[in-house]
Image: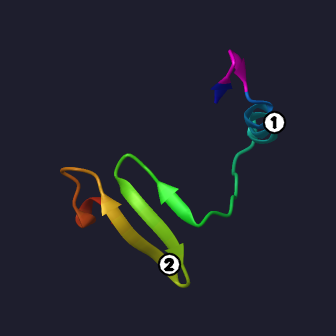
Amino acid sequence: MIRGGKIAMAILGAIDLVAGVGRVVVVVDLIITNLGVLEVVEGGLKLLELADGVTEATLV
């Protein structure tokens, strides 16, 4: 994120933490991709929205 012409320090810190690692584990409650929006619920994921032209089968 650029604010006032400078990159936010929090983003730089996050990049430093994951640079060169093979696997990163994060905990989230919402996943937003170019294919759709998924909510993390007990037992799995709940599909909230699909992008235009994307089917549920595409996500499986």
Q: Picture quarter containing residue 48?
A: bottom left
Q: Main secondary structure of the magenta part?
A: strand
The residue lying furthest to the front in this view is: 4
Picture coordinates of residue 27, whole percent (x, y): 68, 64
* Foreground residue among 56 and 23: 56
Coloring basis for residues = rainbow
Which mark, by number, is residue 36?
Answer: none
Picture coordinates of residue 58, whole percent (x, y): 27, 59
**Amino acid found under the numbered disc labelled 1:** Gly
- In the image, residue 33 sits, relative to residue 27, either above or below, namely above
Q: Assign the N terminus to one quadrant of the image.
A: top right
Residue drawn at (21%, 50%) of the image: 52
Tell me, yes or no, whether the highlighted magenta stretch contains residue 4.
Answer: yes
- Dot 1 lies on which element? helix
Q: Which residue is mark 2?
A: 44
Q: Picture quarter containing residue 18?
A: top right
Picture coordinates of residue 45, whole percent (x, y): 46, 73
Q: Which residue is mark 1?
A: 13
- Dot 2 lies on which element? strand
* Foreground residue among 38 and 6: 6
- Say which of marks 2 and 1 sits in front: 1
Q: Are marks 2 and 1 in contact (CB under 8 Å)?
A: no
Q: Which residues are magenta?
A: 3-7
State how far apart marks 2 and 1 are (Cα). 30 Å
**Amino acid found under the numbered disc labelled 2:** Gly
Work out whether residue 39 can be spotted: yes
